[in-house]
Image (spheres, helix red, strand yellow):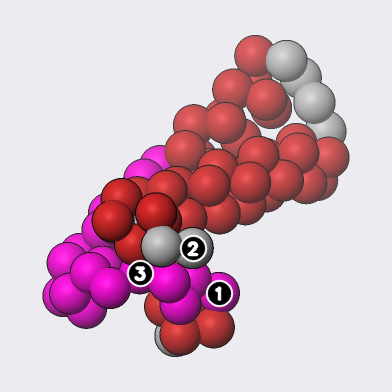
Amino acid sequence: MSKYVVFSDSKMKGRIQLFRYLMICLFNLVLNYILLKIAVENFHIYPVIAQILTISIVVLFSYVAQRNFSFKASPEEEITE
């Protein structure tokens, strides 16, 4: 769905995009867990505040990773723009 709504410039095959998308999603789950664990246990931040901060970081990372990795337009496509 993101391919057609947000990142419509990419001409990469759908199965490659799906694989990359799933890799980023799994990485985001791990990143969320690690950041939340560090924030609560090491920095003693209240869990709700830590989750808000963690979500903000993971959402930003996810957008950048999806734009530049999963749904990246090929270099020849970028030249024609």
Q: Position of residue 31 (x, y in %)?
A: 47, 38
Highlighted range, magenta: 6-30
47 sits to left or right of 12: right
Whole-Å distance between the Cαs marked 3 and 2?
Answer: 12 Å
Could you tell me the amino acid type at mark 1?
Val
Q: Position of residue 73 (x, y in %)?
A: 35, 60
Query: Reading the chain from its start, which is encountered first: label 3 or label 2?
Result: 3
Q: Which amino acid, by three-letter code, is at mark 3?
A: Ser
Residue placed under numbered mark 3 in the picture: 10
Q: Quadrant of residue 57?
A: top right
Give whichever of 30, 68 is nearer the camera: 68
Magenta-drawn stretch contains 66 = no
For mark 2, give the secondary structure: loop
- Residue that appears at 73% across and 15% down: 43
Distance CA(mark 1)–CA(mark 2): 17 Å
Q: Which mark is residue 6?
A: 1
Residue placed under numbered mark 2 in the picture: 81
